[in-house]
Image (tube, rainbow, N blue to C red):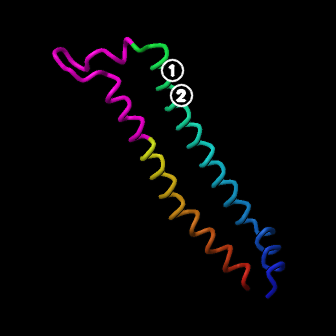
Amino acid sequence: MSTELTVSRIQGDPKFHQLVRQRDGLAWALSAIVCAIYFGFIMLIAFADDFLTQPVAAGSVIPVGLPLGVGVIIASIVLTGVYVYRANTTFDRLIHDIIQDASK
């Protein structure tokens, strides 16, 4: 089977369009969340540095900014995990189905 025929079959497959919509939607949503988290943290640094330098609890030497910064990193890791999980389950299944349909 020619490569051009396979490509045209894939591009015409409704499952391919579903895959693109779902993948793009998830990527944009997660990107927006990450940007909001990062820019929110930077805005806190710029405009609420007095809040970030307060201790977490009375008598503590740990400033509020430290757990918030760690939270930004953990949130990024979790959101990456969400994408990977979705890619390994939903997207991979759709890709397999698309390839099977195109090779018939």
Of the 4 image quadrants, the one containing the C terminus is bottom right
Q: Point out residue 42 in the picture as x, y percentages from the top left corner.
A: 49, 25
- Using residue 1 as the reference point, say whether residue 64 is left or right of it: left
Asked if 53 appears above or below 33 in the picture, the reply is: above
At x 45%, y 52%, the residue is 81
Q: Quadrant of residue 87?
A: bottom right
Asked if 68 appears above or below 47 in the picture, the reply is: below
**Magenta stretch encompasses residue 62:** yes
- Using residue 9 as the reference point, say whether residue 61 is left or right of it: left
Disc 1 packing (10 Å; few <14; some 14–19; many ≥20): few
Question: Which residue in the structure is indicated by mark 1?
Answer: 43
Residue type, label 1 = Met
For the residue pair 80 and 26, the one nearer the viewer reads as: 80
Disc 1 is placed on an element classified as helix
Pointers 2 and 1 in contact (C-beta within 8 Å): yes
Asked if 35 appears above or below 42 in the picture, the reply is: below
- Using residue 49 as the reference point, say whether residue 31 is left or right of it: right
**Magenta stretch encompasses residue 67:** yes
Residue type, label 2 = Phe
**Residue 39 badge:** 2
**Residue 16 badge:** none
Q: Point out residue 100 in the picture as x, y percentages from the top left corner.
A: 66, 80
Report how far apart the C-alphas of labels 2 and 1 lie in the structure: 6 Å
The residues colored magenta run 50-75
For the residue pair 15 and 42, the one nearer the viewer reads as: 42
Outermost left residue? 59
Q: Point out residue 69 in the picture as x, y percentages from the top left corner.
A: 38, 31
